[in-house]
Image (cartoon, helix red, strand yellow):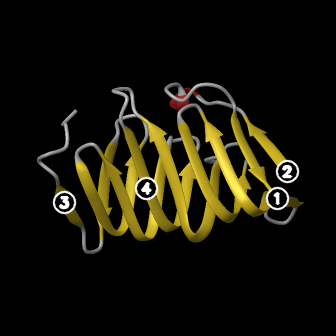
Amino acid sequence: MMTLLAQETEAQSRQEGPIQIDADSGEFDNRLNAYKLFGNVKISHGQLSVMADEGFAYQTEGEDERVELFGSPTRWTMQMEDGTQATGQSDEIIYNLTQNIIVMVGNARVEDSRGVFTGARLTYDLETEKTEGEGGVKVVIDPSRPQN
């Protein structure tokens, strides 16, 4: 099992501790300046967990640090401050560690205590808990769910 730890940035202050990335196997590609991750990729950072089949982890001075994940589907879960849980899934996830956002591409879906938000591309801000969507956005609000 490969484990990669990234440094915490100021934008990630809500997520505590180091970012841990685990995978069945991996390698470093000098041309891409990236780690290639294969099999059961999992990112853990504070209350956030992200799971995928494979991915790339980029950590370059002066650029956004990010992890690009692919799967069928990629998934994430996060325990919210109010005790509820938010989940998401899509064909691809780009977790921008510098900006603390998750971009979901292809069959994207976010579900939390307020309802379900789907679209071709969704962006979820981990700090503000705000979701933005593009491409056939659909929102389903369940009035029986407790609101934040």
Return the x and y of residue 34 as percentages of the image width and height.
Answer: 78, 58
Return the x and y of residue 74 as percentages of the image width and height.
Answer: 55, 63
Query: Mark 3 or mark 4, which is nearer the start of the sequence?
Result: 4
Crowdedness near tag 4: few (<14), some (14–19) or many (≥20) residues, C-alpha within 10 Å: many
* Residue 9 visible in the shown view: yes
State if disc 2 and disc 3 touch (CB < 8 Å).
no
Type of amino acid at the residue the image marks with label 1: Asp
State if disc 2 and disc 4 touch (CB < 8 Å).
no
Judge from the rendering whether residue 139 lies leftward or rightward of residue 59; answer left or right: left
Q: Which residue is mark 1?
A: 24
Q: Which residue is mark 4?
A: 88
Q: Which residue is mark 3?
A: 140
Residue 114: quadrant of the picture: top left
Q: Which residue is mark 2?
A: 2
**Inter-mark Cα distance, 1 to 2:** 6 Å
**Inter-mark Cα distance, 3 to 2:** 39 Å
Residue at (76% x, 49% y) in the render: 22
What element does badge 4 sit on? strand
Query: Mark 2 or mark 4, which is nearer the start of the sequence?
Result: 2
Residue at (65% x, 46% y) in the render: 43
**Inter-mark Cα distance, 4 to 2:** 24 Å
Judge by depth and name the residue closer to the eye, 115 or 45. 115
Judge from the rendering whether residue 1 lies leftward or rightward of residue 61; answer left or right: right
**Inter-mark Cα distance, 3 to 1:** 37 Å
State if disc 2 and disc 1 touch (CB < 8 Å).
yes
Query: Mark 2 or mark 1, which is nearer the start of the sequence?
Result: 2
Judge from the rendering whether residue 129 lies leftward or rightward of residue 43; answer left or right: left
